[in-house]
């Protein structure tokens, strides 16, 4: 009699197990035979997301050997965390759209698959020399190639031309940071109650990009944040000059605000805002006023940190690696690249893409977009500290200390140098 | 109320008469163990073992990816206690918990007293005021981020006419934590009110009737009768709200990311950042353990105090 | 208090007025965010960025919802949330009922110790277990699976406690009769105890479902691909996308998540609130 209750419990256990098979059935989505199925982790939304989906679909339709499943993983910062988590769990995707400064971080721990042999054994018309050297450069780690450039961007300044014209200024972006400050003064308006109507500039906050535009300003002043050997340079004059300028505009001139989204620009609260070349499509299509895309202001020089994403291979299976390689080549070929450039405003990554008839015609018709190409000459990789686990967080804190807490720039920079060095010693070395 | 003290007593039929191990008792033992097995296996693996494992991990340096963990003794605790952000986070957490508890309980007590009359429309009011309790916190945080918008937010509608400056709530160091507190109060009032109301219903009517005969004023009524007799509820809510506030995460993760400058960073969010954003597993485990000790301490103090202070 | 006087004089009306005024004010403060969410979700971008804001848009923009729906695979998120919350509730109730029945009806010398151990588990905050649970799941290969989302949270202390209390109130004679009919423990639980506990079981199921549906932190940590995300995690992800998405789309997307919960709440509102008030459910 009592045995029956045991039988029931066992049945229950069996039920539990069978539900897990049900789950498994819902989770497994791949067939082991037939075409090779690979997983592609993408980032970015809006047109930049759509164009990736479009290219994946096009690739899947163009051949029957490889099927790519594209999975959106959130912003760059999130894709990194997810990749770390996936590596920890041992279940990695095959191709990842990776924020460029992170190639060394993953390559040094062996998480990325080196592409050199695939390049060497490639029997197609593929030519590595076609890639623009400045953009291919940060795909290398320790002499080996780990990534191909795909959606590369530079930071740009977006200017509300109408607002400048209203203030009696020419519809022209500032060439230097001094001009940037003067224009901001001219367009700023407060009402009688002292409430802000509009100001000159919005300085980007947040984890993902705040550091990038700041790096741009430091480069313009002739300095850098950190070098390849992880020497820290924030306490030097150029970085302090850039920091002081930003802070003074917010707190002394009151002609700029810290801003956490492009909404402030689109809602005409600020006349100038930083953005990636990749934001161009979105901003041009949504703004109800004239948008002038321009270089990040120079000062002693014009120089900007290249951002955006590269394609890296995380595959750990020979067949999938070959499939992943085919997909990577497709994503960066002239045709695909021209499509990406036209849709989003990212930069061409190969010479053949830059000379692609579609692209040549396109820049002729849309001269304001050519700025992305013009700025190509003035690019260099980002600071090495970006690849530290806590690197972007420390720089986010730095920008907030400057622009929200109004702390003394020299002190802030010294603290930031120390924090970055500590993080390097703890987590990278 | 969740668990009343007096119900901690043992199951009555389980503790049986002492007899030899008859076939029946042995069979019952077997069935008993079989029945509780799923629960105890799960509790063991996912609730008890983690405490021990956190303790172990807190002595190691490990990034969760590397196959190798490095033993570093008390170094994680040392860097924890010398970490200014840890102290800032601790302070924020306590401020958040205290402010939330005091304001939320006061408001919900007033509302419960108003609801404890025989006015019409009670169930309507109750349904509305209680509704945030079961509302998805991520969605709540989304709406409130938009309410706090410095240019077009709803809150500005009420602040601007007063001639006050509408702050940029989520991006100013002095306002980010208050913003979080406001949202937590908004979401928690209904639950507390319903529990207070249940507590009020438990106070025998006769006491008030007797007081009425003695000509006691409503205020005296509240001070000498209602408040003391309500103290078990008040005490229970204080403790559970406090512990609940120590565990705040969702609202902060969505609204402020703990910023700006860690001004709204709290214990669980900092733990999350360390563990799952920066992969400092050992450091985060030390943090987890401190949170555990804190909550255990409060629970024990609750057990002690409730015997002395609370009028039953 | 006033009600006892049964005399509707001037003071009585004043008191009434204030009581209603306070409760109406509270209801407005609680209700306004919901209203704000709904009206924002049907505005045009221009209407969203207006100050002072308008309460009703000139034309209702239903297409905000289709735009929001296309921002992420919300259909998949719905499926994931339904599967994880649904199976989670079923498993947790089963686990709870088994323990509760054992504690209430099966003789065992040391059941008291087991009971204390179970109650002790209630004091341990689940946040402390994040890292160890992640590591355990990693070893089991359960990261980014439904199992991984569900199983760590189906152990039950409160539900077991609650059901035990209820099982104890069932008259012993019923159990004896069941035993005489030759029912084993499992079937007694299934056919006698559980049906009698139906009212409390209903509240428990609703409550567990809503809290699992709403949970954010654990699914956030344990899922890492789009196709495994639950609604709250998916929603948070939409917000953090690099390009600005208008508030109207975010509010519309938030409504996707909220509608099922609010629906359950307004259908079973009385049961849920009274369940809590009667001590049926711990918050």
Image (cartoon, rainbow, N blue to C red):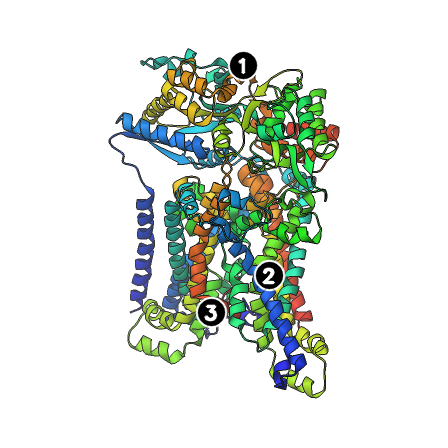
Circle on res. B240: 2
Locate the C terminus of chain B and report the quarter of the image it occupies. Answer: bottom right
Pair 3/2: label in front = 3
Locate the N terminus of chain B and report the quarter of the image it occupies. Answer: bottom right
Q: Chain of mark 3?
A: C
Q: Are marks 2 and 1 in contact (CB under 8 Å)?
A: no
Circle on res. A311: none
Q: Chain of mark 2?
A: B
The residue indicated by pointer 1 is A377
The residue indicated by pointer 3 is C270
Disc 3 packing (10 Å; few <14; some 14–19; many ≥20): some
Residue A420 percent location from the top left of the image: 64, 29
Total marks placed: 3
Disc 2 packing (10 Å; few <14; some 14–19; many ≥20): some
Q: For numbered disc 2, what is the local secondary structure?
A: helix
Query: Can residue C153 be spotted in the picture?
Result: no
């Amino acid at each position: 009699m009592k045995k029956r209750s045991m039988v029931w419990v066992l049945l229950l256990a069996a039920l539990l197990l069978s539900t897990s098979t049900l789950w498994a059935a819902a989770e497994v989505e791949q067939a082991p035979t037939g075409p090779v199925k690979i997983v592609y982790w993408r980032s970015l939304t809006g047109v930049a997301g759509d164009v990736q989906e479009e290219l994946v679909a096009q690739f899947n339709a163009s051949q029957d050997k490889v099927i790519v499943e594209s999975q959106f993983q959130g912003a760059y910062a999130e894709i990194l965390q997810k990749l770390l988590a996936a590596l920890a769990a041992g279940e990695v995707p095959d191709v990842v759209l990776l924020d460029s400064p992170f190639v060394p971080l993953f390559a040094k721990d062996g998480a990325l698959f080196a592409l050199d042999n695939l390049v060497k054994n490639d029997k197609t018309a593929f030519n590595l020399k076609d890639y623009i050297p400045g953009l291919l450069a940060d795909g290398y780690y320790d002499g080996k190639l780990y990534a191909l450039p795909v959606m590369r961007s530079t930071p740009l300044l977006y200017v509300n031309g109408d607002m400048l014209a209203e203030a009696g200024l020419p519809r022209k972006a500032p060439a230097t940071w001094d001009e940037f400050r003067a224009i901001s003064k001219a367009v700023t308006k407060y009402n009688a109650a002292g409430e802000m109507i509009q100001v000159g500039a919005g300085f980007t906050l947040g984890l993902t990009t705040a550091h990038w535009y700041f790096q741009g300003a430091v480069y313009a002043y002739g300095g850098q944040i950190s070098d390849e050997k992880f020497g820290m340079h924030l306490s030097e004059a150029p970085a302090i000059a850039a920091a002081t300028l930003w802070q003074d505009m917010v707190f002394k001139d009151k002609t700029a605000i810290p801003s956490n989204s492009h909404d402030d620009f689109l809602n005409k609260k600020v006349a100038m805002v930083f953005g990636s070349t990749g934001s161009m499509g979105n901003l041009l299509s949504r703004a109800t006023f004239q948008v002038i895309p321009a270089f990040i202001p120079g000062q002693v020089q014009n120089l900007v940190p290249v951002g955006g994403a590269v394609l890296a291979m995380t595959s750990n299976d020979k067949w999938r690696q070959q499939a992943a390689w085919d997909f990577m080549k497709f994503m960066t070929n002239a045709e695909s690249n021209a499509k990406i450039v036209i849709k989003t405003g990212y930069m061409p990554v190969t010479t053949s893409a830059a000379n692609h008839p579609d692209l040549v015609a396109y820049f002729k018709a849309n001269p304001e977009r050519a700025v992305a190409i013009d700025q190509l000459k003035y690019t260099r990789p980002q600071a090495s500290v970006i690849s530290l686990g806590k690197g972007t967080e420390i720089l986010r804190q730095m920008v907030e200390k400057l622009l929200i807490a109004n702390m003394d720039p020299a002190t802030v920079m010294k603290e930031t140098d120390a924090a970055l060095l500590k993080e390097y010693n703890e987590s990278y070395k | 109320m969740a668990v009343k003290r007096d119900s901690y007593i043992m199951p009555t039929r389980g503790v049986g008469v002492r007899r030899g191990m008859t076939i029946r008792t042995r069979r019952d033992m077997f069935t008993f163990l079989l029945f509780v097995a799923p629960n105890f296996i799960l509790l063991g693996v996912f609730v008890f073992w983690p405490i021990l494992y956190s303790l172990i991990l807190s002595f190691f340096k490990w990034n969760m990816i590397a196959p190798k963990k490095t033993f570093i003794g008390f170094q994680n605790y040392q860097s924890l206690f010398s970490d200014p952000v840890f102290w800032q986070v601790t302070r924020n957490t306590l401020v958040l918990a205290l402010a939330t508890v005091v304001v939320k309980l006061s408001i919900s007590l007033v509302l419960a007293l108003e609801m404890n009359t025989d006015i019409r429309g009670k169930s309507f009011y109750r349904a509305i005021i209680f509704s945030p309790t079961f509302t998805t916190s991520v969605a709540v945080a989304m709406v409130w981020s938009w309410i706090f918008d410095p240019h077009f937010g709803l809150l500005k509608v009420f602040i601007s006419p007063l001639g006050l400056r509408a702050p940029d709530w989520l991006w100013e160091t002095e306002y980010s934590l208050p913003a979080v507190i406001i949202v937590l109060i908004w979401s928690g009032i209904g639950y507390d009110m319903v529990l207070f109301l249940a507590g009020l219903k438990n106070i025998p009517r006769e006491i008030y009737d007797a007081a009425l005969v003695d000509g006691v004023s409503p205020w005296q009524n509240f001070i000498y009768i209602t408040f003391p007799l309500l103290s078990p509820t008040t005490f229970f809510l204080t403790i559970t709200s406090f512990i609940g506030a120590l565990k705040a995460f969702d609202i902060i993760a969505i609204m402020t990311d703990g910023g700006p400058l860690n001004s709204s960073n709290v214990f669980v969010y900092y733990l999350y950042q360390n563990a799952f954003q920066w992969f400092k597993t050992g450091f985060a485990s030390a943090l987890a353990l401190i949170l555990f000790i804190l909550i255990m301490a409060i629970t024990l103090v609750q057990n002690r105090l409730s015997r002395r202070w609370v009028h039953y | 208090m006033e009600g006892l006087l049964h005399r509707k004089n001037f003071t009585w009306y004043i008191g009434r007025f204030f009581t209603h005024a306070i409760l109406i004010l509270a209801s407005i403060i609680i209700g306004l965010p919901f209203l704000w969410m709904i009206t924002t979700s049907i505005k045009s971008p221009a209407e969203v960025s207006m100050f002072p804001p308008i309460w009703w848009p000139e034309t209702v923009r239903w297409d905000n919802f289709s735009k929001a729906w296309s921002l992420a695979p919300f259909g998949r998120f719905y499926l994931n949330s339904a599967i994880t919350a649904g199976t989670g509730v079923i498993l947790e109730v089963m686990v709870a009922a088994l323990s509760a029945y054992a504690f209430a009806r099966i003789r065992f010398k040391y059941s008291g110790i087991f009971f204390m151990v179970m109650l002790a588990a209630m004091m341990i905050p689940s946040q402390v277990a994040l890292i160890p649970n992640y590591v355990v799941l990693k070893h089991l290969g359960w990261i980014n699976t439904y199992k991984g989302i569900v199983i760590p949270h189906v152990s039950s202390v409160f539900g077991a406690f609650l059901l035990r209390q209820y099982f104890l109130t069932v008259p012993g004679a019923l159990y004896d009769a069941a035993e005489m009919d030759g029912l084993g423990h499992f079937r007694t639980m299934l056919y006698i105890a559980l049906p009698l506990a139906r009212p409390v079981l209903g509240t428990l199921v609703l409550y567990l479902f809503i809290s699992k549906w709403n949970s954010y932190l654990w699914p956030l940590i344990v899922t890492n691909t789009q196709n495994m995300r639950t609604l709250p995690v998916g929603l948070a992800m939409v917000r953090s996308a690099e390009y600005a998405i208008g508030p109207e789309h975010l509010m519309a997307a938030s409504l996707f998540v909220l509608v099922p919960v609010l629906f359950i709440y307004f259908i079973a509102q009385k049961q849920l609130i009274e369940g809590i008030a009667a001590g049926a459910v711990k918050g």
